[in-house]
Amino acid sequence: MNAQTEDEEPFLQIGGALRFNMILQDYESSINATSSSFTLDTWRINVLYDNPAGIGLNFEYRFYPTFGTHFIKQGWLEYQFSESTQGQLGVTQVPFGNIQYNSHNWWFSLPYYVGLEDDHDMGIKITHSSDNFRWDFAYFFQAEPEGPPAAFGSGGPGRYSYDVIPDGNTSLTERNQLNLRSAYQFDESEIGGSVQFGQLYNSVRNEFDSQYALALHADINSGSFNILQQILYYKMDTRNDAGENISTVFMGAYAIPYEVSTEAWIATLGISYSYDVEWGPVTNLNFYNDFSYMANSIGSGSTLTAGKSSLDLEENFQSTIQNITGLLVTAGPVYTYFDIAQGINHPWLTDNFGIGVGPGHEDLGTGSSEYNIRYNINIGFYF
């Protein structure tokens, strides 16, 4: 949004989207009648507003029939202090890593599944541009509001982005998070770094633990090519309700919680090629491949909290791999993703949902991780 002059009129836009998902899963078990499905993925409402005083609103609410829940994705008030400085207050995107996304596909990249891609929290953010630099400063008091628990399944928190949640014997929530992001911009590209530091509040112990994350990232455009690169490290120094050091915390989104390692490195590389066409309503084809690798850094002798039980680990947790090869077809207001999602030790690409970015299959006695594939077509109409 640009600064407005006094003769400009207030602007209000109401839109949304309706998306469908076609799935074929080839996981640990053999393909059968339950391996494929055609679902109503999402429908959502969007509201944008700004006026001559420089005050604006950005709001999005989503409904997920497949998961039986609904929730706010984003919702902030904004004020344009000048052409180079804007403030946002409310549920706004956390300025960390490549933004808005660190991926080209419908699945995102691995940082999303540990709360470090397209995360939204409740707080205040200032964005300032000067010469070739963009600076983002933010303070988040807490995670975004939860929607209702799923009407079926685990009944975890309904929300869009992954955050630490209370579960088992770890009564933790995110509080008091600070973010600083800086990026040097040139030729429609940028390279930068991000720092995040925050607290984890244990309501049983009535004490605060800490967490932090660091990232180097680049978003490079050259002709029809786009390259997204990022390497990040995060660590959570936290304990369970009994005061014991733990190796995993519970994180939740879409009303389904799972365990996440408290310390890891993640490297990602995504490449896309955009090709314009004139095939009736089809105007663009975007080919891409997004690769992610997550190396857990938990050492021997750590204590793993798994639900209500604990055990000692003899080795590091397993690594997680995700690779998405796909094509985005643009036809007017219809955007269709054709994705081949491949994963090893991935929380979503497995018959044992949620096992992956925490202890892994072997450490929980469910067998070795396998190379799993999901063929996914997502058709979205945006208005």
Image (cartoon, rainbow, N blue to C red):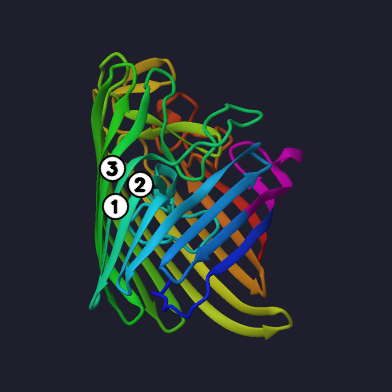
Residue drawn at 57 percent across, 66 percent down: 12
Residue neighbourhood size for the residue with mark 3, other residues' Cα within 10 Å, grouped as few (<14), some (14–19), many (≥20):
many
User: Is the magenta region chiefly helix, strand or loop?
Assistant: strand
Mark sitting earlier along the chain (1/3): 1
Residue that carries the numbered disc 1 in the rendered image: 138
User: Where 234 falls versus 172 (above or below)?
Assistant: below
Q: Where is residue 4 in the image (x, y as percent from the top left)?
A: 42, 76
In the picture provided, is 2 more to the left or to the right than 218? right
The residues colored magenta run 21-44
Q: Where is residue 273 in the image (x, y as percent from the top left)?
A: 49, 76
Quarter of the image with the N terminus is: bottom left
Labelled disc at residue 177: 3
Q: In which quarter of the image is residue 126?
A: bottom left
Task: State the SS at label 3.
Answer: strand
The three-letter code of the residue at mark 2 reads Gly
Task: State the SS at label 1.
Answer: strand
Labelled disc at residue 123: 2
Asked if marks 1 and 3 touch (Cβ < 8 Å), the reply is yes
Q: Can residue 237 be seen in this view?
A: yes
- Assess whether residue 31 is covered by the magenta stretch: yes
Distance from disc 3 to disc 2, alpha carbons, whole Å, reads 9 Å
Residue neighbourhood size for the residue with mark 2, other residues' Cα within 10 Å, grouped as few (<14), some (14–19), many (≥20):
many
In the picture provided, is 166 more to the left or to the right than 375? left
**93 or 105: nearer the viewer:** 93
User: Where 49 falls versus 315 (above or below)?
Assistant: below
